């Protein structure tokens, strides 16, 4: 077959450029990335052979091999594995494209902000470790043969936008990456990656825990003669099987980076070993930053399942519930059978026991962090609080038992101040006279803080939970009580107790109410006197039997057809605007001159809660008409 030339996808090209030109990056990590890929490929080989043992025929022991040579007068570094390999399609789709959704938008945002990201950040966000090879090499060849297939392929690129693919030969399945090293600029402290000691040091530092042997051919003088031999560079000890006191912070951090593809250090880790009955070990990490696509991308890395030190699968969903999907690391079981499949896992009672125990441990660890390192916990909560709250709406009955524990570690903004509170802190600080936990949900905090629905609570000195995450719309209605206090949504018609002075309703004649009803017609479900407003003229609330307004908005923004729930307009009988309307109505004015004011009040209620008016142009015309009128007024050309 002829050599064919292909072009990198636009995003790939852009990423490559960003990576090659990133100034601050630690270039050593290219080796970590290539070794990680090789180790993953060996895991896949093992899994495939477990399913089809015939494939093992003729294969040598799994290993990763590093060698150095000169080729075409250039120093090269060669990294070879006998893992799963790639066929032509895989080669093109894995290496030539970035599959991550949202990559284009994310890159555009970086470009617009003029940000320069470190290569590590790019690798972490996009899972593009392979490209880091171009930081140290100006040409990269990949020779690869897929396990179970006959043909081998050579990929070659200088990282400038195109690559070639052609047929080649390779004896054993696996992948060889050949790096034509750039000449290091020693004056700038650049390393020579063909140096034995440099490579040794990097492998030890970043990849010591890789379970497959990483071998390097070394030359030693013996009796004045050069002798070559393979030397193993890594100890290969599973880090989660070592006592915590024997593992350095750095080793944990490197393992985290390897297993999570994150370039930041983890926020915290959790190490456990459970014996007696079901035996398992775990090493879990909470990342310090949420990946940009945490809320919408399919799960990828997650927590890997090992059985007796043998890798079984990435992101074991049966082990970690979706609301803890930000966790990274490993759980290693002593008791599960090695040949277990995903389907069987779902039903496995042993795995359920492990899952339950892992979830409990994680919740305890988070609670400990909350109690002992508040600032750290608040950082955690900002990154992952939304995901944790999904646990409250999880449909999985098995998790119901965790509800209390999850509520205990939730943080909320409140009207009582700028800091976030736990429910316990909030309840403990409730002012005298406040019987319930009041809350308000909406799309962002500043809109919530300014909501007219808070006015009476503010007047009474009550404190209200403000919830602005999308998940709150579904989570909050599941809240019933905490510490003996009931939850009440301020968006609901009967949220607040009736005032018993009886004054409010008598102050507005039925006439105003029916006038509003007449003008608004079907737009609202009802018009009522409000007991919650003090400074605003009107607000909208949801009937007790309907969905929430913000929820409706969220579903709409996701493109879903939702019936719009008619809401109740509440008016403030004490407000000047309402009183003036009343007076003018009593003088015999009607829809013609006053109707516009009613529409404006209604639209203004929508805007105040961060919603949209149905017809913005019409709204603008109405405002303009009033401005014109009132400026004329100021001018003194007409009587006040
Ligand atoms: P990541 O490893 O984070 O997915 P990379 O850019 O490093 O991203 O690699 C892209 C894909 O290419 C891998 O997911 C894997 O499928 C394939 N790949 C890379 N290196 C190898 C290898 N040595 N053997 C087999 N497949 C590989």
Image (tube, helix red, strand yellow):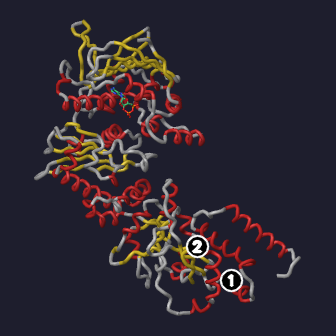
Comparing 390 with 221, the one in front is: 390
Q: Position of residue 540 (x, y in %)?
A: 56, 73
Q: Earlier in the sequence, mark 1 or mark 2?
A: 2
Dot label at residue 522:
2
Task: For the C terminus, give its image quadrant.
Answer: bottom right
CB within 8 Å, label 1 to label 2: no
Q: Which residue is mark 1?
A: 576
Q: Is residue 269 left or right of residue 594?
A: left
Look at the numbered disc 1 and say if its residue's Cβ is closer than 8 Å to ligand 1: no
- Decide: is 527 above or below 336: below
Query: What residue sits 53% from the left and 78% below the top?
Result: 458
Q: Is residue 151 left or right of residue 238?
A: right
- Decide: is 340 above or below 567: above
Q: Position of residue 5 (x, y in %)?
A: 48, 18
Query: What residue sits 26% from the left and 34% below the top?
Result: 209
Q: Is residue 600 left or right of residue 365?
A: right
Comparing 629 with 46, the one in front is: 629
Comparing 227 with 369, the one in front is: 369
SS of the residue under disc 1: helix
Q: Position of residue 80 (x, y in %)?
A: 31, 21
- One can see residue 289 in this view: no
Q: CA distance from mark 1 to mark 2?
A: 26 Å
Q: Position of residue 328 (x, y in %)?
A: 32, 45
Q: Quadrant of ligand 1?
A: top left
Query: What residue sits 46% from the left and 39% below the top?
Result: 121
Q: Name which quarter of the figure residue 571 lies in.
A: bottom right
Comparing 312 with 596, the one in front is: 596
Q: Name which quarter of the figure residue 65 lies in.
A: top left
């Amino acid at each position: 077959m002829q050599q064919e030339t292909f072009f990198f996808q636009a995003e790939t090209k852009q990423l490559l450029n960003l990576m090659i030109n990133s100034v601050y990056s630690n270039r050593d990590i290219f080796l970590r990335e290539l070794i990680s890929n090789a180790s993953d490929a060996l895991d896949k080989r093992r899994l495939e052979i477990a399913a089809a043992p015939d494939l093992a025929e003729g294969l040598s022991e799994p290993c990763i091999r590093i060698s150095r040579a000169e080729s075409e007068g250039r120093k090269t570094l060669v990294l070879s594995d006998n893992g799963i390999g790639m066929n032509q399609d895989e080669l093109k789709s894995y290496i030539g494209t970035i599959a991550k959704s949202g990559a284009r938008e994310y890159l555009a945002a970086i470009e617009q902000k003029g940000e320069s990201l470190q290569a590590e950040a790019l690798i972490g966000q996009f899972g593009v470790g392979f490209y880091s090879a171009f930081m140290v090499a100006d040409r990269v060849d990949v020779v690869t043969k897929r396990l179970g297939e006959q043909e081998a392929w050579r990929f070659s690129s200088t990282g400038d936008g195109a690559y070639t693919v052609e047929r080649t030969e390779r004896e054993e399945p696996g992948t060889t990456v050949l790096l034509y090293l750039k000449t290091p600029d020693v004056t700038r402290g650049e390393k020579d990656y063909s140096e034995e000691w440099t490579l040794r040091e990097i492998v030890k530092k970043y990849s010591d825990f890789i379970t497959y042997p990483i071998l390097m051919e070394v030359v030693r003088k013996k009796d004045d003669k050069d002798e070559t031999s393979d030397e193993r560079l890594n100890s290969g000890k599973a880090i989660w099987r070592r006592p915590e006191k024997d593992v350095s912070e750095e080793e944990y951090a490197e393992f985290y980076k390897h297993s999570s593809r994150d370039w930041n250090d983890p926020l915290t880790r959790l190490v456990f070993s459970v014996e007696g009955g079901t035996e398992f070990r775990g090493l879990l990490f909470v990342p310090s930053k949420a990946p940009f696509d945490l809320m919408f991308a399919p799960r990828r890395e997650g927590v890997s399942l090992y059985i007796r030190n043998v890798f079984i699968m990435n992101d074991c969903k049966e082990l970690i519930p979706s609301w803890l999907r930000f966790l990274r690391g490993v759980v290693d079981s002593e008791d599960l059978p090695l040949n277990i499949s995903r389907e069987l896992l779902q039903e496995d009672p042993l795995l359920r026991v492990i899952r339950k125990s892992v979830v409990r441990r994680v919740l305890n660890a988070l609670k400990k962090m909350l109690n002992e390192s508040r600032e750290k916990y608040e950082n955690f909560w900002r990154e992952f609080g939304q995901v944790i709250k999904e646990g409250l709406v999880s449909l999985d009955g098995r998790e119901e038992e965790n509800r209390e524990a999850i509520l205990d570690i939730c943080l909320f903004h409140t009207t009582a101040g700028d800091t976030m509170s736990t429910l316990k802190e909030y309840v403990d600080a409730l002012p005298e006279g406040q019987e319930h936990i009041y809350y308000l949900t909406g799309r962002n905090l500043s809109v919530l803080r300014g909501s007219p629905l808070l006015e009476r609570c503010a007047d009474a000195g009550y404190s209200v939970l403000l919830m602005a995450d999308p998940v709150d719309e579904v989570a909050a209605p599941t809240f019933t009580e905490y510490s003996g206090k009931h939850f009440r949504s301020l968006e609901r018609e009967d949220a607040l107790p009736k005032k018993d002075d009886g004054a409010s309703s008598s102050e507005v004649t039925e006439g105003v109410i029916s006038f509003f009803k007449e003008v608004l017609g079907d737009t609202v479900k009802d018009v009522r006197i409000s007991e919650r407003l003090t400074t605003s003229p009107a607000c909208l609330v949801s009937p007790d039997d309907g969905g929430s307004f913000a929820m409706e908005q969220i579903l709409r923004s996701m493109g879903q057809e939702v019936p719009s729930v008619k809401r109740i307009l509440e008016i403030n009988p004490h407000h000047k605007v309402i009183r003036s309307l009343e007076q003018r109505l009593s003088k015999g004015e009607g829809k013609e001159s006053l109707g516009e004011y009613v529409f404006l009040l209604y639209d203004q209620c929508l805007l105040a809660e961060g919603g949209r008016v149905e017809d913005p142009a019409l709204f603008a015309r109405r405002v303009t008409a009033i401005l014109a009128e009132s400026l004329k007024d100021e001018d003194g050309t007409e009587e006040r």
